[in-house]
């Protein structure tokens, strides 16, 4: 690639069995590259296409058929391979093959899956970083996968292949400065880790906040213990705020019982399409995100910001950075969360003003134009440094 030419980019992703925010990030990257006129191609594998036994075997081998990725690099004449999730079917072998075929490699981290068997960095509904560097035995001893064969597989594979993964990657990126610092602390070389913020397309931004006319609080989340949805239900019930809960997960039945027990005016919507999430945001007075673990930089909070909906969130992970310092409450502090929810609910004009400020913040920090500028600068530096 010449100094003035745009890079050719091969995007790699191993889709999860249950898709979520990472797939959203991949789709938005592809859209951004397309609209910027950057030649690119997607190389994708899907965990849902193979049995769990075959996935485990692939994880232990460090991925399967790395020569297919090398051929994709050659076919595109790719300058950069930008990988998102690589486990279990792509793995470090494919990244090494991409480098061998002449591409530089960027690995986009959306979680701590290089170290943690679940990828979330949580245990018992709270933060957990017992596993770090190549120390993965705690995940086995605690059976974090809730399956001893899977726990053994992850403990062995993550420890075995971590050096090869680090060696194959020229630059690691994460969606917040907090997340970049965290993965460096867990074992990645800090000099090769940086933040690359999420973006939203122009049509995702509202002209003004409608939160002042909002009629309910909204939760849009996986229904699992680390998300702290109990706290959202209790706060909404105590403040007299109608609550809508969008999402599925192992906690749904228990949370429905809790809502009934507390007399919360709660409606559980199940898993809904992104367009329906947007519709729910348009009628919301606030979004509740009382996470008990460290979120990297959740799209659900960013989408609420872009629609001008205030977020009542805990000060966990990248949330303070995303929403603005001082805009969050401490984890497991029900009175603080209740005070925040009650204040927003009782002051429609204040929540509309806060919503307008969030739209401005999201436009300034998370626009498509800004993201693409940062992304092309990243590629230029990676190529210019020669790895």
Image (cartoon, grey):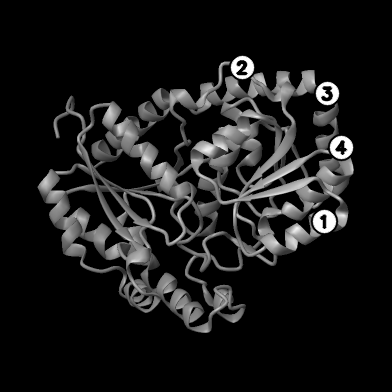
User: Residue at 22% of width from left, 39% of height from top?
Assistant: 40
Q: Answer few, some or many: residues within 10 Å of disc 2's Cα (few below 14, many 20 plus, some between 14 and 19).
A: some
Is the Cβ of the residue at disc 1 closer than 8 Å to that at disc 4? no
Residue at the spot x=56%, y=47% of the render? 296
> Gap between marks 4 and 2, in whole Å?
25 Å
Asked if disc 3 and disc 4 are in contact, CB closer than 8 Å, the reply is no
Judging from the image, what secondary structure is the residue with disc 2 in? loop
Q: Point out which mark residue 208 bears.
A: 2
Residue 346 x %, y %: 85, 27
Q: Which mark is residue 347?
A: 3
Q: Which of the two labelled residues, at mark 3 and mark 2, occupies the earlier sequence position?
A: 2
Q: Is residue 115 above or below residue 183?
A: below
Tag 1 and tag 3, C-beta contact below 8 Å: no
Residue sitting at 56 percent across and 27 percent down?
306
Give neighbour class at mark 3: few <14, some 14-19, many 20+ (Cα, 10 Å). few
To which residue does mark 1 refer? 260
Q: Counting other residues with Cα less than 10 Å from the Cα at mark 4, is it few (<14), some (14-19), or many (20 or more)?
A: some
Mark 2 vs 1, N-terminal side: 2
On the question of residue 126 being in view, the answer is: no
What whole-number distance in Å separates the C-alpha atoms at marks 1 and 4? 22 Å
Element on which disc 4 rests: helix
Distance Cα–Cα, label 3 vs label 4: 12 Å
Q: Secondary structure at mark 1?
A: helix
Q: Nearer the viewer, mark 2 or mark 1?
A: 1
Percent x, y for residue 145? 54, 73
Mark 3 / mark 4, whichever is N-terminal: 4
Q: Where residue 228 sits: x, y (%)?
A: 72, 54
Closer to the camera, 8 or 340? Answer: 340
Q: Which residue is mark 4?
A: 339
Q: x, y (%) of residue 189? A: 43, 53
């Amino acid at each position: 690639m010449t100094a003035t030419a745009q890079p050719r980019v091969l995007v790699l992703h191993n889709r999860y069995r249950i898709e979520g925010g990472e797939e959203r990030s991949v789709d938005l990257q592809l859209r951004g590259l397309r609209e910027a006129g950057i030649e690119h191609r997607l190389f994708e594998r899907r965990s849902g296409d193979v049995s769990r036994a075959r996935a485990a075997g692939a994880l232990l081998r460090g991925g399967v058929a790395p020569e297919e990725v090398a051929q994709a690099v050659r076919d595109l004449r790719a300058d950069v391979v930008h990988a998102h999730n690589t486990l279990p079917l792509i793995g470090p072998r494919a990244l090494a093959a991409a480098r061998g075929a002449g591409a530089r490699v960027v690995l986009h981290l959306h979680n701590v899956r290089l170290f943690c068997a679940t990828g979330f960095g949580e245990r018992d509904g709270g933060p957990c970083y017992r596993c770090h560097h190549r120390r993965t035995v705690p995940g086995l001893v605690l059976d974090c996968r809730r399956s001893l064969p899977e726990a053994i597989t992850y403990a062995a594979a993550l420890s075995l292949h971590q050096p090869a993964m680090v060696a194959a990657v020229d630059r690691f990126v994460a969606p917040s400065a907090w997340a970049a610092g965290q993965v460096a602390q867990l074992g990645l070389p800090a000099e090769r880790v940086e933040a690359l913020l999420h973006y939203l397309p122009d049509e995702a931004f509202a002209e003004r906040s409608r939160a002042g006319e909002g009629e309910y609080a909204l939760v849009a989340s996986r229904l699992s213990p680390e998300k702290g949805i109990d706290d959202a239900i209790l706060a909404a019930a105590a403040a007299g705020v109608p609550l809508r809960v969008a999402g599925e997960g192992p906690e749904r039945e228990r949370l429905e019982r809790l809502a009934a027990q507390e007399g919360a005016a709660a409606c559980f919507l199940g898993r809904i399409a992104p367009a329906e999430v947007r519709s729910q945001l348009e009628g919301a007075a606030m979004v509740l995100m009382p996470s008990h673990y460290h979120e990297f930089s959740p799209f659900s909070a960013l989408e609420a910001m872009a629609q001008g909906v205030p977020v009542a969130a805990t000060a966990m992970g990248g949330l303070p950075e995303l929403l603005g310092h001082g805009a969050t409450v401490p984890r497991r502090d029900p009175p603080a969360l209740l005070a925040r929810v009650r204040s927003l609910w009782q002051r429609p004009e204040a929540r509309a003003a806060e919503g307008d400020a969030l739209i401005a913040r999201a436009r300034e920090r998370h626009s498509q134009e800004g993201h693409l500028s940062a992304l092309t600068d990243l590629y230029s530096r990676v190529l210019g440094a020669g790895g």
